[in-house]
Amino acid sequence: MEKYVDISPILEGSADKIGFSFEFEVPDSSEWRDVAFPTPVRVTGSVTDTGGYIELSCHTDVDYVTPCARCLREVRGTLHLVWTKGVAVAGTLVNEDTDDYVLAENGRIEVFTPLAEQIVLEFPAKVLCKPDCKGLCSKCGKDLNEGECSCPKKEIDPRLAALAKIRDQLDD
Ligand SMILES: [Zn+2]
Ligand SMILES: [Zn+2]
């Protein structure tokens, strides 16, 4: 699985732009608890030298399958990522411990690690099958999107109950 971009032509000054397109399998990781990635991820991008500042820019569509956070129904979606990083030759940065840069070693950069970080960073914290998913009843487990269950509803505030009673009487 190719995952390096050779940027030596840029470092040597003989090119100012290098394009690439790779396919990756997102590896299983504890990071992904119940998320699956059914198709390989294609990352397309370029490395550009703009007057000495070298930038990596990528776009990626990540297909995923995960249970709805409320009703557990399977949700299929696509995460669209557009991201950029600076590129620095290893050993030239004061602080190499930064996420803002990808380091070039032996004239090449590795694209998968920053991509994997980006997926983690931008993956929605909560995926829902639809914005107004009603979820499951916490008592009987029925999918409330399919209709009400017969469980007693949440205890009503006694003051509201009193109001409801008055309203019932007015209706009569
Ligand atoms: Zn749902
Ligand atoms: Zn119920």
Image (cartoon, helix red, strand yellow):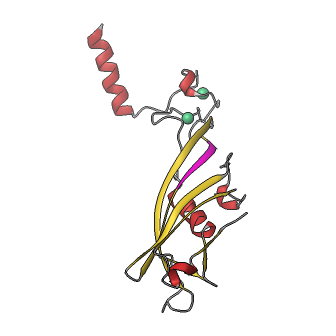
Numbered disc total: 0
Residue depicted at x 34% and y 30%: 160
Name the main secondary structure of what is drawn in magenta. strand
Would you say 114 lies left or right of 32 here? Answer: left
Whether 172 is drawn above or below 132: the answer is: above
Q: Position of residue 163 (x, y in %)?
A: 30, 25
Residue depicted at x 56% and y 39%: 70
Whether 113 is drawn above or below 44: the answer is: below
Q: Is residue 26 magenta?
A: no
Residue closer to the observer: 72 or 85: 85
- Which corner quadrant of the image does residue 54 belong to? bottom left
| Residue 69 appears anywhere in the view | no
Would you say 156 lies left or right of 142 here? Answer: left
Whether 163 is drawn above or below 8: the answer is: above
Residue closer to the observer: 20 or 113: 20
The part of the chain drawn in magenta is 60-66
| Picture quadrant of ligand 1 | top right
| Residue 51 appears anywhere in the view | yes
Would you say 25 lies left or right of 85 here? Answer: right
Q: Position of residue 102 (x, y in %)?
A: 54, 77
Report the quarter where the N terminus lies.
bottom right
